[in-house]
Image (cartoon, rainbow, N blue to C red):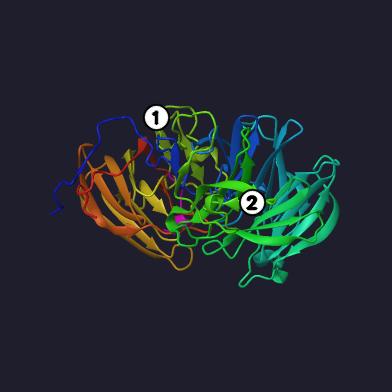
């Protein structure tokens, strides 16, 4: 017998954000983005701030976010609608694609330099950060070139600093400087390694990467993380000459805080003369979430986080702090829910490869999203390009959708999925008849162990599906035939990371027979009241 009803559907169509950094009293809490906006970079243009992040092989790529107070952010576009080379990204290329990018505003244009570690460094430009953005231009080809950042110097010269990926180039822990042509499109001169992490006199110094290049008060600064993603810190190098030699300080580390590996981000200022630093924290299944730290300058060195108040050279991340002295902005967060009543998908959705028109429709069933099932040579969705996914939205949240499925033949399946190296799903599967099923796949990227279980009797063709995510990425699936009473099914599933990314959730349809699934909506809300689940 199925367990008794323990879930009750929320009646309201309103879907409040599941994480708000703005505490409403003039302070904010970290993280400011409890979602996988990895390797953030930020630039100011007038009163507006624009953030971009790495997106790896997810499409569209290069998300662009906007804020006016540095705390409340909205997702406004993607600068890269499709990945290039086009043919290379017709199928999932986990961990490849867009690595750590940079964004700058110069000469009336926005400039994004981004690396693909297998092809080289690309440039996109736009007069408006909301787009349209130019097609990618290959500035420098090569294997292992990563984390580029430009600087337009006072004498008109254009420089670009970058790191190296050992997996492709055989070297890392060094930073190389290029002089570009005046238009920023080509390399005019390779100035070689200007900072060698192997020569830094600091115990355990390793994996120097993610450089950001700035100039202030006659100093050239390189802000660069080191020590590795999960355990590292933020270093700052400075020199009177861009070619060096550079002196070095560690300015931000975990210390006694719960914020591990605080590094790799962006330095920005305000009209009021304040300075702030963005960085990420590796949060396992939640990905690399974004924090904001206060900065002040002392003897032309930046003091970050707690160092702003106590004056020590090396700061620790603040958890709650006064908001920047900027005009008030309404509480905001990147979108998550989607009613599918627009002619385009919400910006939060990404595919696993460059999408094809045959994968979906928003007009075939007006007011719904139709996913057309694609055939798989195996039963492993890890290699399916047509998964429609989005980032985890906060530490705890609840996702609900309603789906209709026209499955007619054995092997057809569709539903709601939590995706990573391990993944799990709940939905409908045709096994003689259409029945509720759950699936769990372990080690999907290596040697998959696939377990799919039919639950209960025939309930198709329409069903409400739900997953509730609790602290630590603990997931429980549930279903309802009427949208009111939800029954939990299956064991608790612990979400896992993907290749350089956090876990994602979303929708899928898989069919060797041309079946399709219609999703009326997806609603992402705060979790149900404590005690209302079986966790």
Query: Is the Cβ of the residue at disc 1 closer than 8 Å to that at disc 2?
Result: no
Looking at the image, residue 83 sits to the left or right of residue 283; the answer is right
- Regarding mark 1 in the picture, which secondary structure is present there? loop
Judging depth in this view, the residue of 477 and 482 nearest the camera is 477
Looking at the image, residue 529 sits to the left or right of residue 248; the answer is left
Q: x, y (%) of residue 80?
A: 62, 41
Kindly report the distance in space between the C-alpha atoms of the residues bearing marks 1 and 2: 56 Å
- Judge whether residue 214 is colored magenta: no
Which residue is depicted at the point 77% across and 33% down? 107
Q: x, y (%) of residue 3?
A: 15, 52
Which residue is depicted at the point 41% across and 27% down? 341
- Regarding mark 2 in the picture, which secondary structure is present there? strand
Where is residue 518, by image quadrant?
Answer: top left
- Judge whether residue 379 is colored magenta: yes
Judging depth in this view, the residue of 344 and 514 nearest the camera is 344
- Magenta residues (range): 373-382
Q: Residue 449 carries which label?
A: none
Judging depth in this view, the residue of 103 and 156 nearest the camera is 156
Q: Which mark is residue 302?
A: 2
Camera sees residue 83: yes
Q: x, y (%) of residue 248?
A: 69, 61
Q: x, y (%) of residue 173?
A: 68, 66
The N terminus appears in which quarter of the rendering? bottom left
Density class for disc 2 (Cα within 10 Å; few <14, some 14-19, many ≥20) is many
Looking at the image, residue 58 sits to the left or right of residue 145; the answer is left
Instruction: Read off the residue under disc 1.
Output: 365
């Amino acid at each position: 017998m199925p367990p008794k009803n323990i879930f009750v559907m929320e009646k309201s169509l309103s879907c409040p954000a599941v994480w708000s950094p703005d505490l409403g009293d003039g302070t904010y809490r970290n993280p400011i983005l409890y979602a996988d906006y990895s390797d953030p970079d930020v630039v100011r243009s007038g009163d507006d701030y624009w953030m971009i992040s790495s997106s790896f092989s997810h499409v569209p790529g290069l998300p662009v976010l906007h804020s006016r107070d540095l705390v409340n952010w909205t997702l406004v576009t993607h600068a890269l609608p499709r990945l290039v080379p086009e043919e290379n990204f017709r199928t999932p290329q986990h961990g490849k694609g867009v690595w750590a990018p940079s964004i700058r505003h110069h000469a009336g244009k926005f400039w994004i330099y981004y690396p693909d570690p297998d092809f080289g460094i690309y440039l996109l430009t736009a007069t408006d950060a909301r787009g349209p953005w130019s097609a990618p231009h290959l500035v420098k080809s090569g294997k292992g070139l990563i984390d580029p950042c430009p600087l337009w110097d006072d004498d008109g010269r254009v420089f670009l600093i970058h790191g190296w990926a050992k997996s492709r180039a055989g070297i890392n822990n060094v930073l190389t400087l290029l002089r570009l042509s005046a238009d920023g499109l080509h390399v005019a001169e390779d100035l070689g390694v200007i900072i060698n992490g192997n020569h830094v006199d600091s115990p355990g110094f390793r994996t120097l990467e993610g450089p950001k290049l700035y100039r202030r008060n006659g100093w050239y600064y390189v802000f660069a993380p080191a020590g590795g993603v999960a355990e590292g810190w933020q270093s700052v190098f400075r020199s009177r000459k861009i070619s060096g030699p550079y002196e070095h300080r560690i300015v931000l580390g975990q210390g006694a805080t719960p914020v591990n590996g605080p590094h790799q981000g962006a330095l920005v200022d305000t009209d009021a003369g304040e300075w702030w630093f963005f960085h990420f924290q590796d949060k396992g299944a939640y990905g690399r979430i974004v924090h904001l730290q206060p900065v002040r300058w002392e003897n032309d060195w930046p003091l970050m986080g707690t160092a702003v108040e106590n004056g020590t050279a090396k700061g620790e991340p603040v958890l709650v702090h006064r908001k920047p002295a900027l005009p008030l902005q309404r509480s905001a967060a990147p979108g998550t829910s989607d009613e599918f009543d627009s002619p385009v998908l919400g910006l939060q959705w990404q595919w696993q490869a460059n999408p094809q028109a045959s994968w979906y429709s928003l007009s075939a069933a007006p007011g719904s999203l139709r996913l057309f099932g694609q055939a798989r040579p195996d039963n492993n969705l890890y290699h399916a390009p047509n998964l429609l996914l989005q980032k985890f939205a906060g530490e705890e949240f609840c996702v609900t959708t309603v789906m209709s499925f026209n499955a007619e033949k054995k092997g057809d399946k569709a539903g709601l999925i939590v995706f990573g190296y391990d993944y799990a799903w709940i939905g409908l599967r045709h096994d003689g008849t259409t029945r509720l099923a759950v699936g769990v796949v372990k080690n999907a990227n290596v040697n998959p162990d696939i377990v799919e279980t039919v639950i209960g009797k025939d309930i198709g063709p329409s069903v409400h599906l739900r997953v509730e995510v609790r602290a630590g990425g603990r997931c429980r699936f549930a279903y309802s035939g009427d949208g009111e009473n939800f029954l939990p099914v299956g064991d608790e599933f612990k979400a896992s990371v993907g290749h350089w990314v956090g876990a994602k959730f979303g929708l899928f349809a898989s069919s060797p027979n041309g079946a399709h699934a219609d999703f009326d909506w997806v609603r992402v809300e705060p979790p149900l009241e404590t005690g209302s689940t079986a966790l």
